Image (cartoon, rainbow, N blue to C red):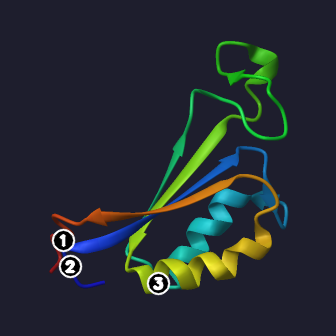
Amino acid sequence: MLTPSDGYLLRIFLGELDKYQHRPLYEWIVMQARDMDMAGATVTRGIMGFGPKTRTIHTFKIERLSEDMPIVIEIVDTIEKVEHFLKYISWFLKDGLVTVEKINIRMYRSQEE
């Protein structure tokens, strides 16, 4: 991805226990992003949250509820690549929340360049 001034942020909210082919769904999504030459992806594990399936608060403070913590995947790229990627992975997202927002990219570089 070249460094345009405008980019788009794809944010995917999942549960830690969500799976695809017996592996964590967030791992599969990041591998797909890499394979589709997206600019980059970051996965963050939340320390507290709830979602549409249950109104129960999941938090690391309560041992029995800490097994399905919130996961957020963030991917930045052009709108065309974000939309294409989202169209592909949407078939594999059974639960969760997906947002896309316009952002201003200030820097995207590597020491190797």
Instruction: Name above or below for residue 83 compared with residue 20.
Output: below
Q: Quick one: label 1 or label 3, which is nearer the N terminus? A: 3
Q: Is residue 37 visible?
A: no
Report the quarter where the C terminus lies.
bottom left
Question: Mark 1 to mark 3: distance in Å?
Answer: 19 Å
The amino acid type found where label 1 is placed reads Arg
Q: Nearer the viewer, residue 96 or 113?
A: 96
Assess disc 2: are there few (<14), some (14-19) or many (≥20) residues with their C-alpha within 10 Å of its C-alpha.
some
Residue at the spot of label 3: 81
The amino acid type found where label 3 is placed reads Lys
Q: Quadrant of residue 27?
A: bottom right
Left or right side of 81 for 5: left
Helix, strand or loop at label 1? It is loop
Residue at the spot of label 2: 3
Q: Is residue 112 visible?
A: yes
Q: Quick one: label 1 or label 2, which is nearer the N terminus? A: 2
Residue at the spot of label 1: 109
Helix, strand or loop at label 3? It is helix
* Residue shown at 20% from the left, 79% from the top: 3
Q: Nearer the viewer, residue 3 or 41?
A: 3
Residue extending furthest toward the top = 62
Question: Mark 2 to mark 3: distance in Å?
Answer: 14 Å
Q: Where is residue 22 drawn, in percent x and y?
A: 84, 61
Helix, strand or loop at label 2? It is loop
* Residue shown at 72% from the left, 52% from the top: 96
Question: Mark 1 to mark 2: distance in Å?
Answer: 9 Å
Q: Where is residue 107 drawn, in percent x and y?
A: 16, 66
* Residue shown at 72% from the left, 72% from the top: 90
Assess disc 3: are there few (<14), some (14-19) or many (≥20) residues with their C-alpha within 10 Å of its C-alpha.
some
Left or right side of 105 for 18: right
